[in-house]
Amino acid sequence: MKLWTRITICRSSAVRSLLLGAMKLVGCYDSMGGRVMPGRSQKECEAGTRNLVHLYERALAEAPQELVKLDEVLHGNGTLSPRFDHNFD
């Protein structure tokens, strides 16, 4: 997985072009081409990126309390936060 991540984060435009060209030849460009990072940041992604950073920072602030609750549950002394009341089946 680490190798795939390194490959798709291309710092060189030549490597990016080669990778995308190889994907076209193999026939997986439509399904995999979007995973290759573009050379420049895209303006249409800025709002989504800001939102993700905000959510990440909020999660970092809440994580210590949630971990304490989890430790209590594992030792049979507490209950989990309602945020864990659902699963993704």
Image: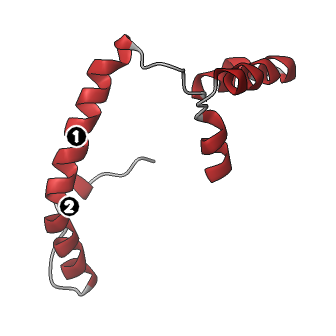
**Where is residue 18, by image quadrant?**
top right
Q: Residue furthest bottom?
A: 75
- Which residue is at 71% across, 27% downward? 15
Image: 75 above or below 47? below
Q: Find residue 22 and report its horizontal and vertical position in percent.
A: 81, 23
- Report whether 31 appears left or right of 77: right
> SS at mark 2?
helix
Give the number of marks: 2
> Looking at the image, can residue 82 be seen?
no
Q: Look at label 2 and name its amino acid.
A: Ala
Q: Earlier in the sequence, mark 2 or mark 1?
A: 1
Q: Are marks 2 and 1 in contact (CB under 8 Å)?
A: no
Mark 1: which amino acid? Leu
Against 53, is 69 above or below? below
Residue at 42% over, 20% down: 41
Residue 14: numbered disc = none
Q: What residue does disc 1 label?
A: 55
Q: Position of residue 89 (x, y in %)?
A: 45, 48
Left or right of residue 61, residue 35 in this image: right
Q: Residue furthest right?
A: 25
Q: Is residue 2 above or below residue 10?
A: below
Q: Residues within 10 Å of mark 1 (few under 14, many from 20)?
A: few
Question: In which image quadrant can residue 73 be found?
Answer: bottom left
